[in-house]
Amino acid sequence: MTRFATLWHKELLRFFKVSVQTVAAPVLTALLYLVIFGHALEGRLQVYEGVRYTSFLVPGLVMMSVLQNAFANSSSSLIQSKITGNIVFVLLAPVSYLEFFAAYVLAAVVRGVVVGAGVLLVTVWFVQLRLEAPVWVLAFALLGAALLGALGLIAGVLSDKIDQLAAFQNFVILPLTFLSGVFYSIHSLPPFWQRLSHANPFFYMVDGFRYGFFGVSDFPPLASLAIVAAFLLVVSFANLALLKSGYKLRS
Amino acid sequence: MQKRYGALRALAGVSLEVEEGEFFGLLGPNGAGKTTLINVIAGLARADSGVARVMGADVRTDYRRARRMLGVVPQELVFDPFFTVRETLRLQSGYYGLRANDAWIDEVMHHLDLTAKADANMRSLSGGMKRRVLVAQALVHKPPVIVLDEPTAGVDVELRQGLWQFVRRMNREGHSIVLTTHYLEEAETHCSRIAMLKEGRIVALDTTRNLLGSFSGLELRVHLERDSLPAGVPGRVLVADGGQFRLRLANPLELEAALARLREAGATIREMEVHPPDLEEVFLRLTGRAS
């Protein structure tokens, strides 16, 4: 337990020590999205009955921040450790791959949730928000952050250079988050794109998370949660197999 | 033990045993396989065939025990720029499952002259100081076996002295030490037994004394008043340059005979030096690069 707790603690310290970059910056980014999109689209777009566009937007932005930051935490921590070589301190110690996985993913969850909470705290000053079912909010935030933290760990293991990681972030994570319904309801899309959106796991996370606030969603929330949990399970097993093999960590 | 990296045979069948409490040297030129061998023992690399055990614990099947028995000082000057020296050592203790380790951390820092830098960020330390922290990190869990991979590369003389004092103390207290180096003097001074590696194979494995005794002889350097060496002087001529000669002699008896022959022939000696055997000679001969 000490081994896992130490590595987890180290991962938390790592981002808390540079919290201006790791927490304040993403909160500001989300706030900018809110100001720009809110200002441009308020009054032109009505997604749910009785919900103003800016109110609709906030949970999406919060979840987007949770997901992106969870991914950024595990992936950038690991790639930095690999590039600087200090990953060796963990590899030399009797830390199991399961402890390694749990520490990185749980630290990513904390980072994602802290940033998400930050975005929420800042935006509730500007936007009226209901909170219909907080348990759903929490469940989707935690599972979503864990899924992205685990994906970040895989990306960190596979990448040898920052560029490769950036490509993963720019060509996979960013499009999937933007096309997940953060800024719109997928019901406003043409049928083809609606169907395509259902193949995007990020859609279920954002949609389910939003359900917790408004009690309305595009997809049944329990089914969304099951889908997210299934993705988490698959990615976790892939992760553990990758770590156990020692691929790109132990030559 | 065998290990390949693509077409490169890093370890081409290495087999050796280090006794408990030994100060063991692993010598060889760059690319001989020293670091690969250490990486396999430390679990940083996996052998294609063969097994490595640390105090009886298999490094793969019983990796937790094997790694607890082993402290490795890596060759590269790596550090985590987010932390201070004390934080670094506390974290490292935690990775070995040790919670309250401050008393030992303080002692290690004291012996390595790190106490004054305990709360300094790793980034702010000089290269030599960073090296000391690496040594301290390898010792947080009091491992019975300590591996030092080129510990003095790029380290100033003062630190080198301090480091050796500390490592010798650990050795006296019963820790086994495995040292890789290409500074032959270091191995000669500290190691009781030495393995020499070349292209992934062991080319010599013996006590330092035996290696020095069996492979090397004396070298006699004389400056004569004449340009030619009298006939009948024993030994092998390594260099003959004007009146200067360098002769390889098997033992002190041959040295005596050589000097007697020079006197007999009436050769006047202007200057004379006798060099004792050193590992460099042994090494060059074994790796086939001797002159």
Image (cartoon, coloured by chain):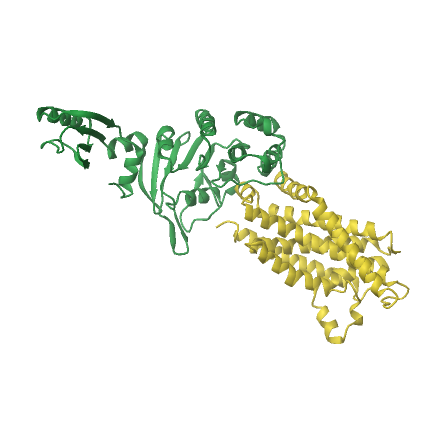
Chain colours: A yellow, B green
Q: Quadrant of the C terminus of chain B?
A: top left
Q: Toward which corner of the image does residue B234 lie, by quadrant? A: top left
- Viewer-nearest residue: B252 or B92: B252
Q: Horizontal and vertical percent for residue A215?
A: 85, 60
Q: Toward which corner of the image does residue B253 lie, by quadrant? A: top left
Q: How many marks?
A: 0
Q: Horizontal and vertical percent for residue B133?
A: 54, 33
- Viewer-nearest residue: B224 or A71: B224
Q: Horizontal and vertical percent for residue B159?
A: 48, 29
Q: Residue at x 69, y 52 (%)?
A: A70
Furthest toward the bottom, the residue is A191
Is residue B80 shown left or right of residue A39?
Answer: left
- Viewer-nearest residue: A98 or B9: B9
Q: Residue at x 56, y 56 (%)?
A: A158
Q: Horizontal and vertical percent for residue B246?
A: 20, 33
Q: Is residue A209 visible?
A: no
- Viewer-nearest residue: A200 or B127: B127
In the rendered image, the vertical position of residue B212 relative to residue A154, given as above or below: above
Is residue A137 shown left or right of residue B61?
Answer: right
Is residue B201 shown left or right of residue A164?
Answer: left
